[in-house]
Image (cartoon, rainbow, N blue to C red):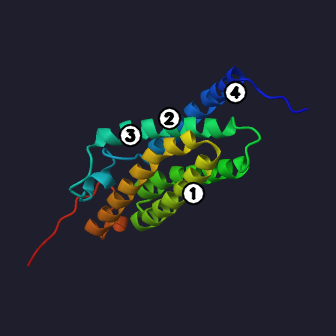
Amino acid sequence: MGQIASQSQLRMAFLRWALVFVPLVLLLGIASGWVANSGYGNPWFDALQKPSFMPPGWVFGAVWTVLYVLMGFALALIVSARGARGRQAAIALFAVQLVLNLGWSPLFFAFHQVTAALALILILVLAVALTIWRFWRIRPVAGLLLLPYLAWLILASALNYEIMRLNPDAESLAPGRARTQISL
């Protein structure tokens, strides 16, 4: 029995999914960063040389909060688009990119694998681009909501690369240990 839903029913379905996915995605993102001791205040990270275009520490928390909220809303739009062609594939792509996203902070900040983290974030950029394309085909607004995320990931990739370039010994640097350079 195919019944057509009213605009208010569709809006309510979206809101119900948003009430689930916005906090879920946000909490998963926060948990990943917290478990990995991400950002400034991490002795290993503090000891690294940073690129000149590195934003202040507070920017990361603010930006990631907004991005995770946008991701949750984008996912809610797609999940609530029942019957849309390609919906399952779009949701699966979102799940893949989210797992990659949540894996980056522990890889970089906890395990100090700067090179592997760069490879991971480049794969993440591709996965997010594919997710945007799939979301756009179902609900263009959902694709648009992920564009700031893609832009931030491109900046994060450049930061990751520059940190790798500026700190060739980053993966072997012990947390909290001061580095000294002796020039002859």
Amino acid tagged 2: Val
Q: Quadrant of the N terminus?
A: top right
Closest to the camera, between mark 4 and mark 1, is 4
Q: Secondary structure at mark 2?
A: helix
Pointer 3: what residue? 63
| Residue 69, numbered label | 2
Dot 3 or dot 4, earlier in sequence: 4
| Residue 10, numbered label | 4
Q: Is residue 37 visible?
A: yes
Q: Residues within 10 Å of mark 3 (few under 14, many from 20)?
A: some
Closest to the camera, between mark 2 and mark 1, is 1
Residue 86: x and y in percent read 71, 51
Closest to the camera, between mark 1 and mark 3, is 1
Dot 2 or dot 1, earlier in sequence: 2
Amino acid tagged 3: Val
Q: Write down the quadrant of residue 4 in the picture.
A: top right
Decide: marks 3, 4 in contact (CB < 8 A)?
no
Decide: marks 2, 3 in contact (CB < 8 A)?
no
Pointer 1: what residue? 130
Figure disc tally: 4
Residue 157 in the figure: left or right of residue 104? left
Q: Residue at x 57, y 57 (%)?
A: 130
Closest to the camera, between mark 3 and mark 4, is 4
Q: Secondary structure at mark 3?
A: helix
